[in-house]
Amino acid sequence: MEYNKIDGTIKMDTEIFNTINQNYIEFMRNIINNPQLATKFRSNPSDFTRKGKIPFPTALALLLNKSKHTINAKIVHTYYELSDGSSSDFPTASAFVQMREKVNPDVFEDLILQSNQYFYEHAAEFTINYWKGHTLLGVDGSRFTIPESVETEDKFTRTRSRFQLNGVLQGTVSCIYDVLNLLPLNTTLGKVQAEKKPLFDDHIPFIKFGALSSYLKDPILIFDRLYADFAVFATIIANDLKFCIRCKTSSTFKVVENFFKSRKQDQVIEFKMPYSASKYIKEHHFPEILHLRVVKVKLPSGETEILITNLLDKKKYPRSCLKGLYFSRWGVEVGFGKMKSFLEIEKFSSKKLTNVYQDFFSDLFLYTHAEMIKKEEDRQIALKSDNNGNKFSKQAGFAHVCTTIQNFLVRMLFKVEIDIVDLYRIIKQWIWQCIESIRPDRRFERKKRSDSKKLVYNTVRKRQHS
C-alpha cells in the first residue's frame, strides 16, 4: 500500500477494496438472473413460463423499487433503466399487481441467505470480526405495524389499549443478528407472542442446522432481560450453545435477588426448575438443575446490572470483559433502528398478506445488500481518515449508502451487460460524497412511552409524518 501525504490519496488498496465489492455484486447479479431462481420461487409451476413483459428478474426489480411514487411511475423508471431509455412499451399497473401474486416472498429470504453465505465464505477478503474467537449473535424482537385486511387479521395480532379500543394490527419481528459484522442472519415475522417461541422454533434450529451453521464460530447468544427464563437457559445449554443474558434485579429468580443483595460480584449459582417451566422441560428431557454464572456490572449511570451466562471459565472470560460482551448486543437495536428509520420498513405497499411479506423481506434484502457494500468502503474511508490524523475515524453514512443503492440498483443487479468495474467507480464516488464521523460512547436517553402513546403514534402521527 502506498499513501500520498500531499493529496491524501491511497494507491493499490483502492483497487483491492473495489474488487471485493465488484465480485460481490457480480455474484448477486448471477444469482438473480439465473433462470433457476424463477423456477424455485414462482408461486405456481405455470408462472413465468411464457415470454411476457415482466420476466422474473424484472419482477424482482419492480418489487425492490422503493420509491414513493405511484405504481406507474415505478414501472416507467424501472423499464427506463433497463432499456437505457430506448423503450416506451411499459406494462400496466394492473399487470404489475397480477405479477406480484406469482412471486414467492421466500425469494428475498433466499437472496439474504446467499449474500450472508458469500460474506462468510470469503473471509480472506472481508474483515470478519469475532470476540475471543466467537461469533456474537444478538437476539431481539420488535413490533411492527401491519396494514389491516381480512388476510392479515388472521396472521397477526390486534393490539388494543383503554385509550384505543379498536387498536392496531401488529406483528413481532424476531431476528438473529451478527452484531460485530452488522448482518441479520435469520428473521421471522408473525403474531405478537412471547419472545422465546421464535427462539425455540426458528432461531436455535437455524444456528445448529441452518445453511450458515458451519460458518458460525462457537457462537455466543446475547439477550436482553425479556429472555431471562429457565426454559431459555435449558434449551440453549441442551443445544450446546453459549449465552449471556441480562436479568432483572427484582421480580425474578430468588437466587438472583439474593445475589444482588449480597456483596458478591461474580458467583456460580444453582438454578432449579420453576413450576412454570416444568411441563416444557420434562417434555424435552432437559436438565432440571442448572449451574450458571451470575455477574454484577456497573453502568455509567451508577446502576448495577445483573448478567447470567454459562461462560464459567473466569480466566478466559473475566468479569471485566462480560460488560463489553453484553453491550455489543446494542448492534441489533441499531439494526432495527436503521430498518425503521432509513428504509421505512413498516411502510407497506399493499394489504394483501403475500405482498406484506414481499415488502418486508425485500426491504430486509436491501438492508443486507447496503451493509455488504458499506463494509469495504468503510474500511478504506477509516484507513484514509486515520492516515490524515483526524480526531475521529470516519465511515460512510448509512442513509446515503441506501439512497445510492436504490439509485443504482437496476444497473447494479439486473443489467448483466453493464461493466461492473466502470459502474462501481461511479457508485463509489456517490458513497464517498457523504462521510460522517464515528463518535464512540455516544449515549442518548431512551424516551419511554406508554402502550397507548405507541398505538397513537403508529396510527396517527406516523401517517402524518409519512
Image: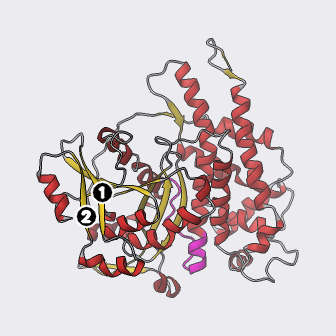
Relative to the observer, which residue lies in front, 372 or 283? 283
Looking at the image, do the residues carrying marks 1 and 2 touch, with CB atoms under 8 Å apart?
Answer: yes
What's the distance in space between the residues labelled 1 and 2, CA to CA?
7 Å
Estimate the x, y position of residue 411 in percent, counting from the top left.
76, 51
Query: Would you place residue 263 above or below residue 18 in this image?
Result: below
**Could you say where residue 183 lies in the image, as x and y percent from the top left?**
55, 52
Q: Position of residue 377 (x, y in %)?
A: 62, 36
Q: Position of residue 375 (x, y in %)?
A: 59, 41
Task: Determine the residue positioned at 36% across, 48% down.
Answer: 326
Q: Residue at x 64, y 60 (%)?
A: 113
Circle count: 2
Note whether 6 is above or below 354 in the view shown. Answer: above
- The kind of residue on which mark 1 rests is Leu
Q: Main secondary structure of the magenta part?
A: loop
Which of the two residues, 269 or 334, is positioned nearer the viewer here?
269
Q: In this picture, which residue range is highlighted in magenta? A: 341-358
Q: Is residue 349 visible?
A: yes
- Residue 253 on the magenta segment: no
Quarter of the picture containing the N terminus is: top right
Between residue 166 and residue 233, name the one nearer to us: 233
Q: How is the image coloured?
A: secondary structure
User: Which of the 4 quarters of the picture holds residue 278?
Assistant: bottom left
Q: Is residue 9 depicted above or below 257 in this figure? A: above
Q: Choose the circle earlier in sequence order: 1 or 2.
A: 2
51 horizontally vs 364: left or right:
right
Q: Amino acid at mark 2?
A: Phe
Q: Secondary structure at mark 1?
A: strand
In the image, 348: left or right of 15? Answer: left
**Residue 145 visible here:** no
Residue named by callout 1: 292
Q: Which residue is mark 2?
A: 271
